[in-house]
Image (spheres, helix red, strand yellow):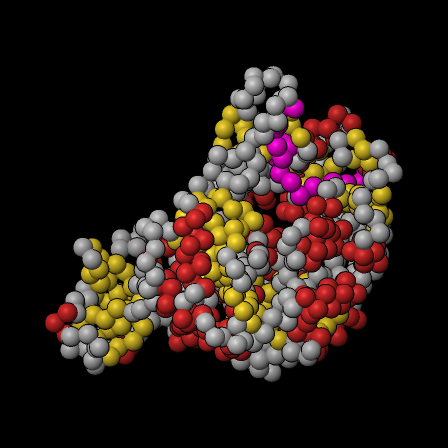
Amino acid sequence: MPIVRVALDVPLHRLFDYQLADACPADVGRRVRVPFGRGEKIGVVVAVADSSEWPLAQLKTANRVEDELPPLPPDFFQLLEFASTYYQAPLGETIMAALPAGLKRLSPPQRRSGRTQRPPTAQPRPQLTAEQAAVIDAIDIDGGFVPHLLFGVTGSGKTEVYLRLIERALALGQQTLLLVPEINLTPQLEARVRARFPEQTIVALHSELAEAARERHWLQALRGEADVVLGTRLSIFTPLPRLGLLLVDEEHDASFKQQDGMRYSARDLAIVRARQQNIPILFGSATPALESWANAENGRYRRHFLLQRANPQAQLPPVRILDTRQIKLQEGVAEPLLAAIRNRLERGEQSLVFLNRRGYAPVLACPACGWISHCQRCAANLVVHRADHCLRCHHCGFEARIPRACPTCGNQDIQAFGRGTQRLESWLQEQFPAARILRVDRDAVKSRKQWEEMLSRIHGGEADILVGTQMLAKGHDFPRLTLVGVLGADAALFAADWRAPERLFAQLMQVAGRAGRAELPGEVIVQTQYPDHPLFAALVAQDYPSFASNQLQERAQAGFPPYTFQAILRAEAPQMADALAFLQAAVTLPEAAGQDSISIYDPVPMRMARLANLERAQLLVESPSRPALQQFLPRWREALEQLRTPRQLRWHIEVDPLEC
């Protein structure tokens, strides 16, 4: 009797064999119902075989193959098998995670056709700049696998380059996958793509979509009906039978890295997928990831430049550094910045005050006894959210009411220290009572609908001052916004994370790029206590290449990526001693000994040592050779799986971590 080899959503590095009388090779890639334990599961047929390594008497019989949908294509499995192997994740979990939720259910909801949308009016193509035309001419859509890096300053028209390349792919009958880092960038980009290609089928894939819509769009992609797919990181696994072009916008963004489950990088998998399918791929950013910049420096990527803004009347805004050691601050704001805001209000222009810290204040404290609003579940402080009358942990979500007096000594004069966007918004409203102030952060914008309403208000001129976090730092074009003021940027300069300078520079460059994108000239004001820091010198010069060169030299000297390759073994348990003991046992395994090209460091508590009532520790594994690391990790993982561990201990391996 034929044997079907099935991938199931279980945390085991194996497939499961079932007997199925009428199985045939055409069933590979189809979903199948199988008995598992005392119940039934949906799996995916990975192979059909004539025999099994298990005795036939031990094999259960599969219930039935679900054949109402096209089978998943071979290149889909090829990519997922690579991801499973590279990121040390079970193949079954990897395959099933790539499917829409409705396709994994035993009783899926009834599928409905989507609402018919009236095609938008086609928008005329803008005139290309000489730089844009040169980039487009240099990229051969039909020339096979070639990775390209597009370094374009903010406002230089990278999106127009994407649209022209999509146009070429459509002319060849090919599909395009365009990845964006965050959901809030999708509506604006989706509207622009639909307006350019009103007769084509454009679908979006992201977590804000209703389950039925996500499944419908995914199936349109699988059937080859979707011409362009716009999506966030999970979209990299979308099956596309006619895929001819891969585009990754804001490729530097950390949101492309999944931080739970299979901890994959969509940006890195995009390169793998483009190579497997022999198609071109284009990464675009005003602040490329240093790994991508290094690949361009050594010739692995072809680099293209857009150094001028697409609108000839829009110039890059000058950046002014305010030395706050010599200026008195009011609620963290210097008088020159207040004067600049006042000036914009008089001229009817918009200002953005950027503070990447949500809530009213980072901590509530008692000056009498020293009590601090610590989270009961995490090694973090509870943030004051005065608008919601609560203290909230931004790591685990724990909430508590704001106490009227100190819980320890009863002092009623407890104080909120530091400032977040809520406090800044309230204070600015006091300073400018006639101004319309709009706060844009995760507390004010919790859904796509709210985000679209917020954007509509900004574009409609219903806001004079924006108070925002990194939600406003990239991808947005507000013609009347001429001033960007940056507060609280110094904290990242001396962070323990060696990637912090790269993230800070990218964030500052991106938010600075929101100013002066139309005819009105812009200005950027950055407050700092370290005006002589090299990072701010590069920011004033708006010289990313110089900054990247210096950072890469430092990383080469220190032996950090991209000049070495890393993986991290993390463990969490109710007791720190158990987590550290497991990691120490991992170091002493025979598979970890005598590895000349592998360095395994001592176990240490993580920077966030306690999260959601679990103590967390980690150890770093490093190698100058990616192949050597990839050969070591599977053997080590198999040995780790044989270790006896406390029942509540959990562990995982993360390859190419963003946080060490």
| Residue found at the very far bottom of the displayed protein | 143
Question: Does the magenta run of residues contain 348?
Answer: yes
Position of the C terminus by quadrant: bottom right
Number of numbered callouts drawn: 0
Q: Residue 393 versus residue 232: which sits nearer the camera?
A: 393
User: What percent of the width, then of the height, locates residue 644?
Assistant: 32, 58
Position of the N terminus by quadrant: bottom left
Who's the residue at 70% across and 45% down the image? Answer: 491
User: What percent of the width, then of the height, locates residue 287?
Assistant: 70, 61
Q: Residue 128 versus residue 181: which sits nearer the camera?
A: 181
| Residue found at the very far left of the displayed protein | 57
Rendering quarter of residue 32: bottom left
* Above or below for 446 versus 655: above
Q: Is any part of residue 503 visible from this angle?
A: no
* Above or below for 78 versus 210: below
The segment highlighted magenta reads 345-367
* Above or below for 563 versus 37: below
Question: Does the magenta run of residues contain 364?
Answer: yes
Q: Is residue 295 left or right of residue 144?
A: right
Q: Is residue 376 left or right of residue 298?
A: left
Q: Is any part of residue 497 visible from this angle?
A: yes
Who's the residue at 61% across and 32% down the image? Answer: 363
User: What percent of the width, then of the height, locates residue 369?
Assistant: 61, 23
Who's the residue at 41% across and 67% down the image? Answer: 589
* Above or below for 466 versus 364: below
